[in-house]
């Protein structure tokens, strides 16, 4: 049985959590393959908003097993808070939440290192969420990290102490005047580790292999977005993992030839949190309207998101890199009320018009070239079928499908799971 894959095609915050929640009824296993608690997946149903950071977005369904894969980095403290929140809704997560032994742990000193490194950069800061993600992946690739499976060893605390001592020396090197109480942070960390140890740790690559042999339906869930990929994103303003389709193979141990459908999620416009280039960013009333109507604030950090028109050059790039087979457009309702919609279809780059994403998209090198389309005024949030869509929305969708050469199979018209319209 093949594995389907769902990921974001922009700078994150596309609405992946909602779509995973909507699709979970069709799957036996939801497997998160990369990232850490810098991600925020928002789900809304029955009048309640839920925000997940590490736990896969299928956790609210009775049937599905939810797996945190080896490519994920886990902060036990944040993970415990997520579990505590699930307790308030009587979710039996111990029966349906599995953790890969090969997933790495975020230590308190990783978070301090993150803050010290960012502070030392000054105006050149990346816009880190300060969750310790980068330093944890650095220890992973530097072969110094502590993994979930190490918690089953008798000497894991000695390993912890050795790595924490190294981190403290690095923090002193930055001389960034970061205030922290490590003793207090460690007490919280060790208590959270004990909670983590009550869950089931597995050899996840073997588990998924056997699940495939048994014909189980598996959906791999990504975090962040393709333009934040450590290799293919807008480096250095990126995350520390592979957010693209290839990350599902390394983050779960799934063979490339086992991936079938690649679902690509994108907003009907573009947003970005933190620093980094953003060719179609708006600084006018249109951008303010998008932010206000779309409630554009980070689910993890609460930071306001920068907003702009849809960038088809960047989106086409993400579709190509990921081999996307189906597109899902989110927040179409936010564009209701704009008389004119703009879509970036090419860039002026070094005096030439190009339609591919170049190495450098800093504002001094790029000028977006727009195609304009007529907007719509209808409220989409009450609609429940494509037959109710205004002509202008259908024209917008048809234009995107033609440019991207990929079908748009789902259109989201609101945050609730019921506000999801499937297109044939």
Image (cartoon, helix red, strand yellow):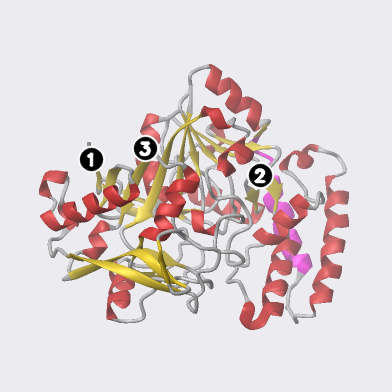
Residue at screen point 48% across, 26% down: 2
Q: Nearer the viewer, mark 1 or mark 3?
A: 1
Residue 127 in sight from this viewpoint: yes
Residue for badge 2: 196
Residue 390 in sight from this viewpoint: no
Front position in the image: 33 or 147: 33
**Do the residues under discs 2 and 1 have CB atoms within 8 angstroms?**
no
x then y, percent, for residue 182: 77, 67
Judged from the image, the secondary structure of the residue bearing numbered disc 3 is: helix
Residue for badge 3: 23
Category of crowding for the residue at label 1, using alpha-carbon neighbours closer than 10 angstroms: few (below 14), some (14–19), many (at least 20): few
Residue for badge 1: 423
The disc at residue 294 is none
Category of crowding for the residue at label 3, using alpha-carbon neighbours closer than 10 angstroms: few (below 14), some (14–19), many (at least 20): some
Asked if 177 appears above or below 210 in the picture, the reply is: below
Q: Earlier in the sequence, mark 2 or mark 1?
A: 2
x then y, percent, for residue 151: 77, 42
Magenta part mainly helix, strand or loop?
Answer: helix
Q: Quadrant of the C terminus?
A: top left
**Residue 238 left/right relative to 291:** right
Asked if 42 appears above or below 56 in the picture, the reply is: below
Residue at screen point 11% across, 54% down: 391
Q: Nearer the viewer, mark 3 or mark 2?
A: 3
As measured in the structure, the alpha-carbon distance from the residue carrying label 2 to the one carrying label 1 is: 41 Å
Q: Which residues are magenta?
A: 182-200
**Residue 197 left/right relative to 408:** right
x then y, percent, for residue 303: 47, 72
**Residue 367 left/right relative to 3:** left
Query: Which residue appears farthest toward the top when viewing the image?
Result: 214
């Amino acid at each position: 049985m093949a594995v389907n894959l769902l990921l974001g095609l922009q700078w994150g915050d596309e609405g992946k959590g909602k779509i995973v929640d909507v699709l979970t009824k069709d799957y036996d296993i939801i497997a998160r393959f990369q990232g850490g608690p810098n991600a925020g997946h928002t789900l809304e149903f029955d009048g309640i908003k839920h925000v997940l950071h590490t736990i896969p977005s299928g956790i609210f369904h009775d049937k599905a097993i939810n797996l945190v894969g080896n490519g994920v980095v886990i902060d036990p403290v944040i993970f415990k808070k997520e579990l505590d929140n699930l307790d308030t809704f009587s979710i039996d997560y111990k029966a349906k939440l599995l953790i890969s032994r090969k997933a790495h742990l975020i230590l308190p000193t990783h978070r301090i290192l993150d803050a010290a490194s960012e502070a030392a950069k000054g105006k050149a800061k990346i816009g880190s969420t300060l969750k310790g993600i980068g330093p944890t992946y650095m220890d992973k690739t530097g072969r110094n990290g502590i993994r979930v499976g190490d918690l089953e060893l008798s000497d894991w605390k000695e390993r912890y102490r050795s790595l924490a001592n190294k981190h403290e020396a690095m923090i002193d090197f930055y001389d960034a005047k970061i205030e922290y109480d490590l003793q207090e942070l460690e007490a919280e960390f060790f208590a959270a580790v004990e909670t983590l140890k009550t869950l089931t740790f597995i050899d996840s690559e073997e588990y998924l292999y056997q699940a495939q042999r048994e014909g189980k339906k598996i959906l791999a869930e990504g975090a962040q977005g393709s333009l934040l990929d450590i290799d293919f994103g807008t480096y250095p303003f990126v995350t520390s993992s592979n957010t693209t389709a290839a990350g599902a193979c390394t983050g779960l141990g799934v063979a490339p030839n086992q991936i079938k459908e690649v679902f690509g999620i994108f907003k009907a416009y573009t947003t970005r949190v933190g620093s980094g280039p953003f060719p179609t960013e708006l600084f006018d009333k249109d951008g303010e309207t998008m932010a206000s109507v779309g409630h554009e604030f980070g689910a993890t950090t609460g930071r306001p998101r920068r907003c702009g028109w849809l960038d088809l050059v960047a989106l086409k790039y993400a579709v190509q890199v990921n081999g996307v087979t189906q597109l899902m457009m989110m927040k179409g309702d936010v564009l209701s009320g704009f008389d004119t919609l703009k879509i970036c279809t090419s860039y002026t780059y070094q005096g030439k018009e190009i339609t591919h994403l170049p190495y450098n998209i800093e504002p001094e090198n790029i000028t977006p070239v727009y195609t304009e389309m007529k907007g719509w005024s209808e409220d989409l949030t009450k609609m429940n079928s494509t037959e109710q869509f205004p002509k202008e929305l259908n024209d917008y969708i048809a234009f995107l499908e033609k440019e991207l050469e990929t079908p748009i199979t789902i259109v989201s018209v609101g945050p609730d799971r019921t506000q999801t319209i499937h297109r044939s």
